Amino acid sequence: MTHQDGRSSPETVFLAFLGGAIGGMIAGILLAPKSGEETRRVIQTHARRTEEDLIERAKEARAALDEVIERGKHFVDEKRADVESAVRAGREAVKERIDKYRD
């Protein structure tokens, strides 16, 4: 996946990075001088830390998303009020014109 300007898309770059990271982990495990039990313990510890980190980041992302949603609701409410005000002003202007031509 490339853009028209010849650059790779962010998704492609991320997948390539992820693939390289996974390949590096596998190579490191296979070539590590530690015993299987010790390696499993290290992997479990790392997996636990990674899980905790991902959960924390997900909570932060959710909080940021909630904030964006609230700002969006506020923006929509403001614009709705602006439109309603403009419609009222337009109706009044039309009514004044109609009344002016009736008299």
Image (spheres, rainbow, N blue to C red):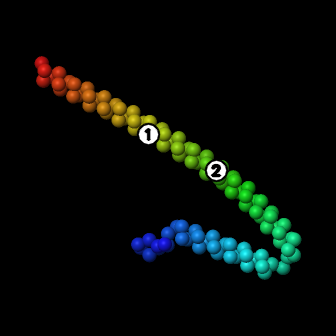
Secondary structure under badge 2?
helix
Please state the total of marks drawn on the protein image: 2
Residue 37: where, in percent of width, then height? 87, 71
Q: Height in image: 102 above or below 6? A: above
Q: Which amino acid lies under the numbered mark 1 shown in the image of this protein? A: Val
Q: Residue at x 35, y 32 (%)?
A: 84
Label 2 belongs to which residue?
60
Residue situated in front as seen by the camera: 5 or 29: 29
Secondary structure under badge 1?
helix
Task: Specify few, some or many for label 1: CA neighbours under 10 Å numbering under 14, 14-19, or 20 or more.
Answer: few
Query: Which image quadrant is residue 45 in?
Result: bottom right
The disc at residue 6 is none
Label 1 belongs to which residue?
76
Q: Which amino acid lies under the numbered mark 2 shown in the image of this protein? A: Glu
In the rendered image, which quarter contains the C terminus? top left
Contact, mark 2 vs mark 1 (Cβ under 8 Å): no
Is 102 situated left or right of 3 in this image? left
Residue 58: where, in percent of width, then height? 65, 53
Residue 77: where, in percent of width, then height? 44, 36
